[in-house]
Amino acid sequence: MILNKLARYAIIIIIIIVSSVHLPKFYNKIFDKSDGSPHFYYSSIKNDFVYFQFQDSGMKYTDLQDNVYTRKSFEKLLPFTFYRDLINWGVMPDTIQGVAIDASVIHKKSARYRLKAKTLDLKEIKLYPLLESQSDFTNLSFPPEVFRIQDRIEFINGSDNEINLEMTQKFNQVFIENGFKFPAQIIAGNPTTKKPFDEGYLIVDNDGYVFHLKKVKGEPFLVKTTIPNNLNIKKILVQETITKKVYGFLITETSDFYMISYDDYRLIPITLKNYIADQMDLGISVNPLHVLFKYDDNYNFHSCVFDSNYNYIDHTQKSKPFKYQKLTEKVKHMIFPFSIITTNNFSSLQHFSLKLHSMLSIIGILVSLIIGFVVKIKNHENIADNWFDFVIILFTGTYGLIAVLLIKSDSWD
C-alpha cells in the first residue's frame, strides 16, 4: 500500500512539473494580446525619430510628438529606407540635406548589421573555412579545407579529414613571425559566400591582441592590428559591405561598443545608453547620412542615431508595459504560483529555472484548497488518509489541484 502511494505521488509530481512548464505558456497564447514592438527609424526629412507599431486597431505610424501618418506619408519621411517606393511614386527627392541622392548612391552607402544576444553564448564548431580574398572569379567559393587554432594553426582537408601539411606549415610560420600567441581566444569571421567580397577573420590571440587573417592568391596574409589588448573582448562581428567603411564591430565584457574602421583598424567608440550586450538584440542601419542603432530587451526599446562619421546626434526610448502591470498577468499569477522556464530569449543554451510569481498566488492557492476539499467530500474520499494531497496543493496551487484530482487516491489504495 505504501508503494502504491509513493507511485501515485511520483506521477503527481511529474504532472506538476510538466504543467508548470506548459500551462503558463498556453495561458499567454490565449490571453496575452499585448501591443507589438515599436520599430524605430530616423527621418532625414524631419531630423527626428519616427516609428510604427502594431496595435489592436491596426498598424500605427507615428512620431515622438504623436502625429499619426498614413503608410504612404510615413514612407516619404524615410527616403533611404523606402526609396524604391518613392521612385515608383515619382516623389524621390534629388537632394537630402544638400547631398545629391539617387538609387545607386543609396545602395553603395547603405549597410545593415544584426547581432542577437543569444549568439554571444553560442557553442560553435571550431572549424573555419578560409575563403580566397582575391579570386580571379566574381563569385566567392568555399575552399576544400578548414582551419582550427589550438597550439598552432592547422588546415584539415575536407575530403579525407587529414591535415594539409603544406598549408599548415606555411600559415603557421607566418603566425609565429608576427608574434601570435597560441591558442586563440576568439576567431571572428563571416564564413559565407553570400557577400560582395571576403575579409577573412579577426582573431584574438592568448595575450588579447587582435590579428587580421586572410588568404590572398593562396598565400597567408596576417596583420597584427592596432587594437589594444586590454579591452577584455566579448564579441567581434565581421560584416563585409560595399561601403568598406568598417570591418564590423567589437563588444567588450562590459558592453562597451566599438566600430572597427578600415582606417588602420581604428576603433570608433559608440556610446549606446543602457545597452547590455547579453540581454539585448542589436540592429544597425547605415545610410548616406546617418547610422541608426536599435536595441531592446523585449520591453525597453532604444534607438540611437549618429551621423555618417559616427558623431552622436540623438537617442530615444519607448517602453512597453511590463507584464505584471496588466490584468491578464495578475490573473495568471493568481492561477499559477510559479512556472518553470526552460528557455531564455537571449541565450542559445537550454535553461531550467524556477520563477516564483507574486503574492497574488496566495489567492489562487486558497481557492485551490477549497476546490480540492469540496471535490473530495463530494466524491466521498477519505480526507484523513490523503491529507498529503492538501500539502501538495498548498505548495503548488492549481498544478497540485489538477494532479491530485486526475490521479485519484481510491484507485491506488
Image (cartoon, rainbow, N blue to C red):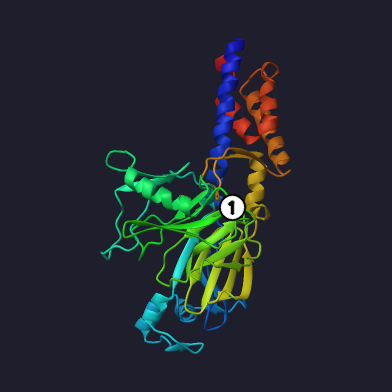
Q: Quadrant of the C terminus?
A: top right
Q: Relative to the observer, which residue lies in front, 341 or 110? A: 110
In this rendering, position of residue 334 left or right of residue 191:
right
Residue lying at the far top in this picture: please name it.
1
Residue at the image position 37 percent from the left and 53 percent from the top? 130
Q: Which residue is mark 1?
A: 278
Q: Secondary structure at mark 1?
A: helix
Q: Quadrant of the N terminus?
A: top right
* Residue 408 seen in render: no
Q: Relative to the observer, which residue lies in front, 378 or 69? A: 69
Q: Percent position (x, y) of residue 249?
A: 52, 62
| Occupied quadrant, residue 85 | bottom left
Q: Percent position (x, y) of residue 128?
A: 40, 49
Image: 88 above or below 372: below
In this rendering, position of residue 215 left or right of residue 362:
left
Residue at the image position 61 percent from the left and 38 percent from the top? 353
Residue at the image position 51 percent from the left and 52 percent from the top? 179
Residue at the image position 56 percent from the left and 38 percent from the top? 21
Q: Percent position (x, y) of residue 51?
A: 54, 72
Mark 1 belongs to which amino acid? Asp
In this rendering, position of residue 48 left or right of residue 59:
right
Q: So how many labels did they put on this image?
A: 1
